[in-house]
Amino acid sequence: MSKRAVVDEMLAGRDQVSENPDRKAMIRASVVNGEALVAANGALATWTPPESTGRSPKDTLIVKRAASQDKIDWDSPNNIPVSEETFEMIFADAVKTLSEKSDLYVTDRVLGADSAYALPVRTVGDQALTILFTDNMFRPLPDDLERSVFVDKGFTLLALPYDKLDRERYQGRLRNLADGKASDLAVVIDLDQRVGVVYGSAYCGSVKKLMFSVMNYMLPEAGILPLHCSANEGPNGHVALLLGLSGTGKTTLSADPERALLGDDEHGWGDAGVANFENGCYAKMINIDPQAEPEIYNAIM
């Protein structure tokens, strides 16, 4: 049975499953459940535990399987392999934990504004805020999704932000922390079975960055160059790409009042042009300055 089928079977046996709830319902649930609060300016605000204030690269893993292992640069410190057996344990734990939750939320979205390579992704989680994040950052299903080269290669993503893995169960399988025990957090991608698990990370960016890694793997074979960049368009139709690591100013520089914004973080560049992978923006709010970044500040604050 495929991983998608396992997840769908688990969902079919549940009563309290909200599939593709509207935005207002997700906002309401996240506030009622204590996942977030409405700030004085009307924006939704949340807080995270210390291990979830950003990505955890050392806990971000890729399943090493025969079909894909020759396509991945395992010499890169950012591509950390995990065994098939360990992933099967993590996946089984995630499905079991989700099946025991009182409420589950599901979104069906895509990555890719160009429907020629839009990648369907089904996200399942127990936190309304995480699912709201996917509704905001991923894109609605296009009417012409059938033209996508990935129409039959959809991805499944399981998110358990506040649950933790059993450290004794994963001793020797996941990295050891300073106390000598295994990490209880894992962000794992299985590129061959097209499934990912975010377990123990309440940083919403873990969800989107997992899917960006998937796009980086899948798109080059479809003739598309994936780029970690922002992009905007001038009055003459010329597109500017602003590449850089997180925190280097991509969002700030792309928010130009004289140019149309395409996106601020993830894009694909192919023969048909440049297209955003995402839907919303991903601005860092720490120490935001209304003088230095007026467009972003005024949009949120």
Image: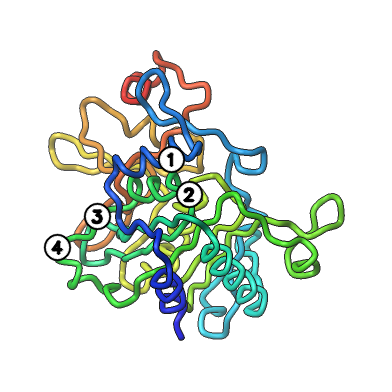
Pick the residue in front: 293 or 95. Answer: 95
Earlier in the chain: of badge 2 and badge 4, it is: 2
SS category of the residue bearing label 4: loop
The local crowd at label 2, few if under 14, some if 14 to 19, many if 20 or more residues have their Cα within 10 Å, is many
- Disc assigned to residue 140: 3
Looking at the image, residue 108 sits to the left or right of residue 46; the answer is left
Residue at point 30% right, 58% down?
109
Q: Which residue is mark 1?
A: 30
**Farthest right residue in view:** 180
- Disc assigned to residue 143: 4
Q: Give yes or no for contact between labels 1 and 2 (Cβ–Cβ under 8 Å).
A: yes
Q: Position of residue 289 (x, y in %)?
A: 45, 17
Q: Could you tell me how far apart the alpha carbons at marks 2 and 3 are, in whole angstroms?
A: 20 Å
- Disc assigned to residue 127: 2
Q: Is residue 112 above or below residue 149?
A: above
Amino acid type of the residue tagged 1 in the rendering: Ser
Pick the residue in front: 228 or 50. Answer: 50
Residue at point 55% right, 56% down?
160
Amino acid type of the residue tagged 2 in the rendering: Gln
* Foreground label between 2 and 4: 2
